[in-house]
Image (cartoon, helix red, strand yellow):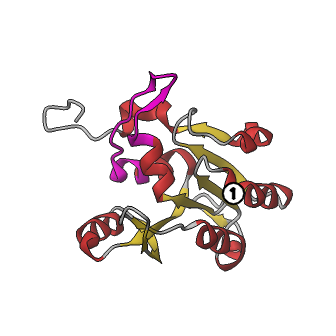
Amino acid sequence: MKKSDKKGTKREIIYAFIDSQNLNLGTSKDIYRNRKLVYRGWKLDYKKFRKYLSNKFRVKKAFLFIGYIKQNEKLYKSLKSYGYELVFKPTVKDNQGKPKGNIDAELVLYSSAIEYPKYDKAVIVSGDGDFYCLHAFLDKNKKLFKIIIPNKYSESSLLKRFQNYKIFLYREKDNLEVKNKNGRRR
């Protein structure tokens, strides 16, 4: 399945599968432990993040799994223009009336069945332990490349087994944060 580049060298085809909610909240939310701030959230620049995936990991396709909300069409259009392939999940309202679209099943289905024959290696973007079985499956089949975790404080303890695959995104904050026109953080 490997593709040949211009020099005839075989290159692995790498796909990214992104849990948008985990990525968004994992980068943007402040985290407190014992009432002490241990992590200051920041705003991820999704355009820069897509370039980061391409440049650092040679990701050919980046699937972004996201709950669909009609009012967010402008956002979806922007994300598509940055190079993401959006996979939508219908949303429902939780007890507080907030929309919720749990995408775990879709991410597992796409990475382990629908897209599985089309790539050599997978990058999973989430610190969620719900993907433990997916990581184990991809690892066993030598298809797991990296697990990108938004921050070390929101990483599931179930991911300890996968130390060799883990990358913490907060370490790239200076390169991936939304900046205003003056180059300052927002």
Q: Quadrant of the N terminus?
A: bottom right
Question: Quadrant of residue 180 in the image?
Answer: top left
Q: What's under tag 1, amino acid-wise?
A: Phe
Callout 1: SS? helix
Q: Within 10 angstroms of label 1, few (less than 14), some, or many (20 or more) residues? A: some
Along the line of sight, which residue is nearer the eye, 14 or 43? 43
Q: Quadrant of the C terminus?
A: top left
Residue at the spot 32% in from the left edge and 42% down from the top edge: 43
Residue at the spot 38% in from the left edge and 35% down from the top edge: 41
Q: Is residue 94 left or right of residue 115?
A: left
> Up-down: is 132 above or below 72?
above
Q: Of all residues shown, which one is farthest toward the front?
A: 95
Along the line of sight, which residue is nearer the eye, 143 or 58? 143
The question of residue 128 being in magenta is answered with no
**Residue 140, x across and y down, in percent:** 86, 57
For mark 1, what is the residue? Answer: 131
On the question of residue 9 being in view, the answer is: no
Q: Of all residues shown, which one is farthest toward the left?
A: 182
**Residue 83, x across and y down, in percent:** 39, 64
Read off the magenta span: 27-50
On the question of residue 69 being in view, the answer is: yes
